[in-house]
Image (spheres, coloured by chain):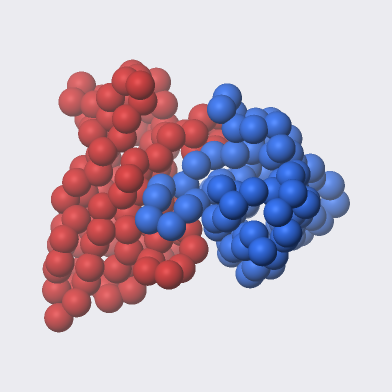
Chain colours: A blue, B red
């Protein structure tokens, strides 16, 4: 089955840029979506179709996808961005939705 | 306002059964595919099952296939998950989530708050 690999944790200073990677075999050929989940809360969609932002999501959140890596970038990070982040794709071989392993973002 | 409200979670013994419900409001359920996603305590998200608008297409994760059954009642604006032969490893918060897009472009734009299922003797 298709596997999406994310770093377990990313630490970033306030005001700096956080980059969260999502690795998968030829992921650049797939549509990647990203979710933010704060403790005790349901996930929230922050990026869909690799680069699109839902209404209400700040422009500080952006995405890219090429080759074997998709990336979620959070600019001007603040304390409110501390959360777990998950990437997600549809695997057409298995007809399964697949989530990445998740990355905990810590603001120093 | 789109709302998804799960119910039916609780404590059940291994081998037991439970039926989860998800009440949808603020949109026309019959126009959207729906999903169940779970999260074991302290773990990541795991997709469980998806169902198309008219129930023509249904998919399951390998870990639940043959034990769980997803269904929907568009007239009642409700999504269901029948869980049989429950195992300790099925312990998790279960979320229902609305699909947008289709096939390879499918993603989840709204999520419920989840219902906790605990499988323990």
Quadrant location of the C terminus of chain A in the rendered image: bottom right
* Residue at point 27%, 76% (across, down): B88
Quadrant housing residue B28 = top left
* Residue at point 70%, 54% (across, down): A14
The residue at the far bottom in this view is: B121
* Residue at point 41%, 26% (across, down): B32
Q: In this orientation, which residue lies closer to the viewer: B61 or B111?
A: B111
From the viewer's perspective, tell me whether residue A40 is left or right of residue A9: left
Quadrant location of the N terminus of chain A in the rendered image: bottom right
Q: In this orientation, which residue lies closer to the viewer: A60 or B13?
A: A60
Q: Position of residue A15 (x, y in %)?
A: 74, 49
From the viewer's perspective, tell me whether residue A43 is left or right of residue A22: left
Query: What count of labels does the image hold?
Result: 0
In the rendered image of this protein, does residue B65 appear above or below residue B70? below
Q: In this orientation, which residue lies closer to the viewer: B77 or A78?
A: A78
Q: Position of residue A73 (x, y in %)?
A: 75, 47
Residue B93 visible to the viewer:
yes
From the viewer's perspective, tell me whether residue A17 is left or right of residue A53: right
Q: Position of residue A7 (x, y in %)?
A: 69, 67
In the rendered image of this protein, does residue B29 appear above or below residue B91? above
From the viewer's perspective, tell me whether residue B78 is left or right of residue A36: left
In the rendered image of this protein, does residue A98 appear above or below residue B77? below
Residue A2 visible to the viewer:
no
The residue at the far right in this view is: A67
* Residue at point 43%, 57% (across, down): A39
Quadrant housing residue B61 = bottom left
Q: Position of residue A13 (x, y in %)?
A: 73, 59
In the rendered image of this protein, does residue B106 appear above or below residue A56? below
């Amino acid at each position: 089955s298709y596997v999406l690999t994310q770093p377990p944790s990313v630490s970033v200073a306030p005001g700096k840029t956080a980059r969260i990677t999502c690795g998968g075999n030829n992921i650049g050929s797939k549509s990647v979506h990203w979710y933010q989940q704060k403790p005790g809360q349901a996930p929230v969609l922050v990026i869909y179709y690799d680069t699109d932002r839902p209404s209400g999501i700040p422009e500080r959140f952006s995405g890219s996808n090429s080759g074997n890596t998709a990336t979620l970038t959070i600019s001007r990070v603040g304390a409110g961005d501390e959360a777990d982040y998950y990437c997600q794709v549809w695997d057409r071989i298995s007809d399964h939705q697949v989530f990445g392993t998740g990355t905990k973002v810590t603001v120093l | 306002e789109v709302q998804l409200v799960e119910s039916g979670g609780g404590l059940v013994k291994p081998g037991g059964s439970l039926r989860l419900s998800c009440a949808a409001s603020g949109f026309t359920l019959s126009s959207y595919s729906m999903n169940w996603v779970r999260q074991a305590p302290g773990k990541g998200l795991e997709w469980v099952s998806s169902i198309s608008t008219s129930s023509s297409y249904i998919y399951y994760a390998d870990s639940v296939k043959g034990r769980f059954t997803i269904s929907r009642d568009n007239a009642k604006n409700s999504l269901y998950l029948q869980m049989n032969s429950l195992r300790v490893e099925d312990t998790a918060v279960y979320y229902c989530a609305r699909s947008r897009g289709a096939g390879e472009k499918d993603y989840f734009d709204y999520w419920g708050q989840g219902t906790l299922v605990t499988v323990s003797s």
